Image: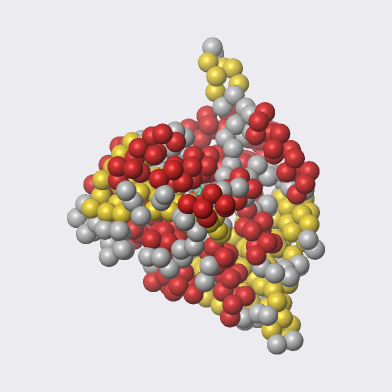
Amino acid sequence: MKILIIGCGGVAQVAIKKCCQADDVFTEILIASRTKSKCDAVAEEMKNRTKAKITTAKVNADDIGELVALISSFKPSAVLNVALPYQDLTIMEACLKTGVDYIDTANYECEDTDDPKWRKIYEKRVKEKGFTAYFDYSWQWAYREKFEKAGICALLGSGFDPGVTQVFSAYAQKHYFDTIETIDILDCNGGDHGYAFATNFNPEINLREVSANGSYWENGKWIETKPLEIKREYDFDGVGKKDMYLLHHEEIESLAENIKGVKRIRFFMTFGQSYIQHMQCLKDVGMLSTVPVKFEGGEIVPIQFLKALLPDPSTLGPRTKGKTNIGCIFTGYKDGKKKSLYIYNVCDHQECYREVGSQAISYTTGVPAMIGAMLVVKGIWKKAGVFTAEEFDPDPYMEALNKYGLPWRISEDPVLVD
Ligand code: NDP
């Protein structure tokens, strides 16, 4: 089967290499991105390591016309969007026009948050829903009916979180609980890259997410916190004790809809003191702003300039040592008895590097991106409409995680987060 992969950054490079491993499914791969030389370099690297036929193209994924032309000429079974969340809607629109299935790893986010048209809709949503994050599912859920009518499938957010965390939730619901009452998603990165400050995936997306207000879902509504206001310590298997902070995260929104009866959903991510101090300082001086400023007769967007100064996340692989531990702690009831469960994966940065030349953050996202695409093109996870991962049968995805490098573990009596 043919797959079109859009983007060729840190996550995409892992997804491409994993599709090359699954060359019994993906027999032809077209890598298309803004910078074609990056696509050519990966194609060259994989040339003698896969039976899949790899071709490359340049595409501006903000341009629906260019995307439609590319999809129409290549005729893939699905498009895997591993560019940026800014391109989600244009790529979905192109899939709709060409009748091709769509998979991505992060929900839509607007690049220019000062755009008055976008801001009007955003402010209405903030009032109605009660969280101020710049990203939410409403933009992509608006395509549900159109995708249904076209008979094509959109699988949203098939990374680790979102993605695997929702598959873990569906799996816990299917096999372990009658009712899930609480879900705590814990994302721990115990890796050290040796730089004073660097982000493990796209700096712009990462810093916008972490420096924003936090929020969690409780008793049917959103509760918003100041940035990094809620801090806990947790002792992670394979990593040890780490400070973690409550963030807003997109899968909370879909899990609140799809896990019936859930009372509270929270998301925590670990950060070291150095990361937080650098981020706070950059925020205080305005370097995280997305609003263009005049500089020496031209215009620059501060966060994009910062991105140019920071290490490229796709180059962190050789330097990053340590492990990640990402998973979900569930509490609820089975056969009238209260119970708790922790499903998680531990991933080693250096092992990822040895296998695909990338650090574990790109790996833990790129592998699920490939798995989501594989289940869709094989027709195992295929329904007409727009869906998140917990809306499908989790079992084949859980099997594929074990097979393709992200084996999971279950703890039946985990320490809970207060
Ligand atoms: P990178 O910045 O490393 O890569 C993005 C790629 O998209 C680059 O190759 C870039 O091109 C390309 N691109 C950007 N804009 C365009 C455009 N207009 N047209 C064509 N190509 C474009 O990002 P990451 O690999 O770190 O992240 C990729 C995605 O994965 C993001 O959406 C991110 O939010 C998501 N993610 C999801 C996670 C999860 O667990 N669900 C975790 C981590 C990330 P160029 O090379 O020219 O810059």
Taking the image as shown, residue 182 lies to the left or right of residue 387, namely right
What is the x, y in percent for residue 3? 34, 53
What's the residue at 39%, 71% (across, down)?
Answer: 403
Q: Evaluate whether residue 93 shows in this view.
A: yes
In-front residue for pair 118/369: 118
User: Is there any visible trace of residue 226 in the rendered image?
Assistant: no
Q: Quadrant of residue 343?
A: bottom right
Query: What residue is at 19 percent from the left and 55 percent from the top?
Result: 48
Q: Position of residue 411 (x, y in %)?
A: 59, 78
Q: Position of residue 47 (x, y in %)?
A: 21, 52
The residue that appears at 70% across and 87% down in the rendered structure is: 335
Q: Quadrant of residue 297?
A: top right
Q: How far from the left and from the top, in percent, is residue 5?
A: 37, 48
The residue closer to the viewer here, 89 or 84, is: 89
Relative height, residue 113 to residue 368 (above, below): above
Q: Is residue 148 left or right of residue 45?
A: right
In the visual, does 152 lie left or right of 23?
A: right
Q: Farthest residue in the top direction? A: 297
Residue 108 placement: quadrant? top right
From the image, which quarter does the C terminus lie in? bottom right
